[in-house]
Amino acid sequence: MTKMSRKPNKTDGRDQDNGKKDTLTETKGFKHPKKAYTVAALKELRKKSTRPSKVQPEQVPVSKDLGQNLRIISDLFHLPKNKDVVIREFLVPLLCPVKAAIIYIDGAADTKLVDGFVLQPLMLLSNINKLDEGGNFETVKNLLVPANQVKQAGNQQEIIDGVVNGDTAILLDNCDLALIVETKGWPGRSVSDPKTERVTQGPHESFNESFRQSLALIRKRVRTNSLMTEYFKVGWRSGTDLALVYLDGVVNPQIVREMKKRLKYIKVAYVTDTGIIQQFISDSPYSLIPTSLSTERPDRVAAYLNEGHVVIIMDGSPFAIIAPITIWGLLHSPEDYYLNPVVGTFTRIIRTISFFIGVMTPAFYIAITNYHPEMIPTDLLLAIAATREVVPFPVVVEVLLMEFSFELIREAGVRIPSVLGPTIGIVGALILGQAAVQANIVSPILVIVVAITALSSFTIPNIAFSLSIRILRFIFIILASIVGFIGIAFGLMVLTYMVTGLKSLGVPMLAPVAPFKPMSGDIVIRRPFFSFDSMPKYTNPQAKFLQAKLVRKWDPISRNKVKGDS
Amino acid sequence: MFRVKEGKISSNGLFVMLIILLVAKIFLGVPQAMVEEGDSAAWLLIIVSALAAVPGIWVLLKLMKKFPGKNLIQIAEELLGRPGAFLTGLILSFFSLFMASVIVREFSETVLTTVLPQTPISIISFFFIGAMLLGAYNGLEVISRASTLLYPFILAGIFSILFLTSNYINFNNLFPIMGSGVGKILYHAPGRSSMYTEVIFAGLIAANIKDTDVIPRQVWKAFAVSVVIFVVVELFYVADLRVPAAQKLYVPLFQLARLIYMGRFIQRIESVYIFVWFFLGALKLTVFLYSSAVALGWAFKIPIYQPLLFPISLLIFALSFIPAGVYTAFQLDMSIIREYGAIIAWGLPLALLVAAAVRRKGGGQTENKMDK
């Protein structure tokens, strides 16, 4: 109380500016309300401070009075402050001319469509006398709007939803319904090459930010009426469109149900990329290994759809999400299927080995040089010792230094403006390679170790997986520096437990190896495409086969094999 | 009805886990102890002790067949009531805990003396404990999957040691064929049947296996495979090193790995086998920790076993330091667990089977239907 009654020694600067010196006082950084409030007074104050309950737009029906409708819409869109919302009033010269207005957002709607397929017929063609279809609204809807998609709106919310999605709303006087005409004209880029999943042989098309184009690219490859696209809206402010795509009759319905459930639970203000959706639907969001596959290749999506997976396409993101997946899928590239099976298998083996090289080479270098030097043949040991002789740091510091520098180069390489791109190469090669060795900061062998590690991590086709390898590598470096091989073995054991516990939409990530299921010959070794006759079992799909039993009927060997099997 | 919340695994998972549980001891003192008692007939001692273990396993499987879909503690509850279940749970829990603490010490000691002589033993034990804690926390499904994933590498590791040291083989070392004599072998065999006590784990997780009718087949298969591995390793061990040397080496397989010399480049690669060693040790310990916690959960009717893991691991960690030295720890394993473990492993199912016969309970298919 004494503090309260004490005279304020300092007034709040903000209040001084506002001329409200007496509302708050500050004593040693703590603000006291000068006035003592009773509970009832506080309740009253809270009541006053809460916003008056606004009438929700979905509760306001479209009025018959055009003027009132426009007033409400102007109010809802904060006109005239909001500049890109356009309201155009005009007269429809029917038998009995009627006042009308269109509402659209400049930039979101295609003005050519608005002019040519909404305004032009309404203002020019409507004065033909024979046009009468039982009421103005029906006439306009059935005869005067030659657009491919037209919806009716009964309340203000539906009008707002249509307009913010790039459509044009038509309001007529004396009509308690509005027409929403499809005129979407969002700016966007055209279909281009994939940026992160390039192949030497195979299609070069990739998804882009346009929702419709992305879906069309899938339809182009899966031309069947069983291809389902269910729409969802995510983000109460962004109102982002999501499509859940799957092949009815092929996919396990439980997987579709599970995915729908997860999508419905996303209650969020906005989403800007499928990466955010992945975090919402992931079984283990903190896992370093992604539990859903992000791809920008429509051919990959088409293949996964045919094998009983579900796909999410999002408006504004060039990446589709595929689920459920297995860890093997993260190591596969679509190219594996387009090449000869032997070559495909070889590249997969290279990638699998490179995963381990990328994660563990620096750790092995530390463990061998620090704890198990007896493993190194004497000549090599002497060579390493000679190069390390002049280096003043312990091996672990040396490795961390180089790895960290390499991470800097990689990160800078992504962020640097393209005109400055070559600078990175010069800095990397010169400073990290040559200069660091000449300055006796690192040993030349370590430069080789770091280079091999870096190359290995770049061979992983999935970006998210490749990034997690970077983090895993540092963990293994620390473990190896503590107890050598035991540390690495511990790390591998923990990694095994974590990976075997991972699930993607309820499917174990290591299936069909652990838990063991009959394999389709598509894990590390890639059998020829004509031998993939049955669907992968781990998703428990409805469809059982991918091809006929005898697909190479002309080949006597295949014929005999099928006979032998039966 | 009360249940401890565990996952379900396939019978294949059981097979792999049993192989890991049984085979892990090959990296510890078993081959040497066998040579000590059987001389050049150590392999024969293994076969005879396996034959001695057959009745024990048969009793366990018979009991499981009588009460399909139920684990030993549930069976004990049905036959002997709550006190019986409590006692069975407690026995199994402490048995696993005791074995785990000895194994932690043995594995840590062998790592310490062979590759990391300057590291404090607590640090090495900590890594084993950490791995088993994480595995057991993730549950039976994860342990089974991890075992399925790693066991090909483990078997490849064991056989690669044998293959890479095959240039040392001298078949004369395997003679005399009867080694220390039939009498001595027959004398030691019943006690050494304790080498297979881990089979009792099948009884503990019987309620969590999807296809109950193939359990016996998988158990026998795992048992047979393990015996074959033991025999082959023992034969190579004796043939490579001769009996007097083979009797004195205390980490036999590691010593064999040390012998590897395939040209100038492939030599001194014993450190690589630390991986096999660690995977085997950690997986076995994980199963023991899991068994101990779950058995305690059943005994005290605790539906979620995970909170028990940390205290039990702490106990394992503390108990593992009680043996005064590496010799005492090995002695504890070979002279107590591998001699008298059979009493618990074969005695407990036998007691329950006798109780079932006396109370005339359990009837295979009928029980199965009732359970469903």
Image (cartoon, coloured by chain):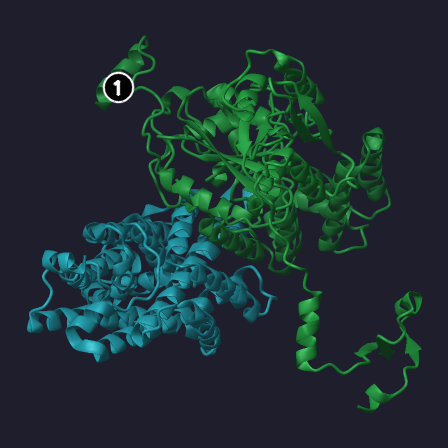
Vertical side of A14 occupied by A209: above or below: above
Vertical side of A314 occupied by A389: above or below: below
Marked residue chain, label 1: A
Question: On the rendered image, what quadrant is the C terminus of chain A found in?
Answer: top left
Q: From this viewpoint, is residue A120 visible?
A: yes
In which quadrant of the rendered view does residue B297 lie? bottom left
Give the percent coordinates (x, y) of residue B142.
Answer: 41, 54
Residue at 11% over, 70% down: B356
Apparent side of residue A59 relative to residue A14 in the rendered image (left or right): left
Q: Which residue is mark 1?
A: A562
Q: From this viewpoint, is residue A316 visible?
A: no
Q: Nearer the viewer, residue A498 or A167?
A: A167
Q: Nearer the viewer, residue A190 or A331?
A: A190
Question: On the rendered image, what quadrant is the N terminus of chain A found in?
Answer: bottom right
In which quadrant of the rendered view does residue A204 lie? top right
Residue that sits furthest to the front in the current view: A96
Give the percent coordinates (x, y) of residue B254.
Answer: 46, 55
Name the kind of residue labelled 1 in the image.
Val
**In the picture, which chain is cyan?**
B
Residue at 23% over, 61% down: B49
Vertical side of A466 occupied by B233: above or below: below
In which quadrant of the rendered view does residue B234 lie? bottom left
Residue at 54% over, 23% down: A141
Residue at 31% over, 11% down: A553
Apparent side of residue A502 relative to residue A274 in the rendered image (left or right): left
Q: Colour of chain A?
A: green
| Badge 1: residue crowd in 10 Å (few <14, some 14–19, many ≥20) | some
Total number of numbered labels?
1
Give the percent coordinates (x, y) of residue B345.
Answer: 25, 68
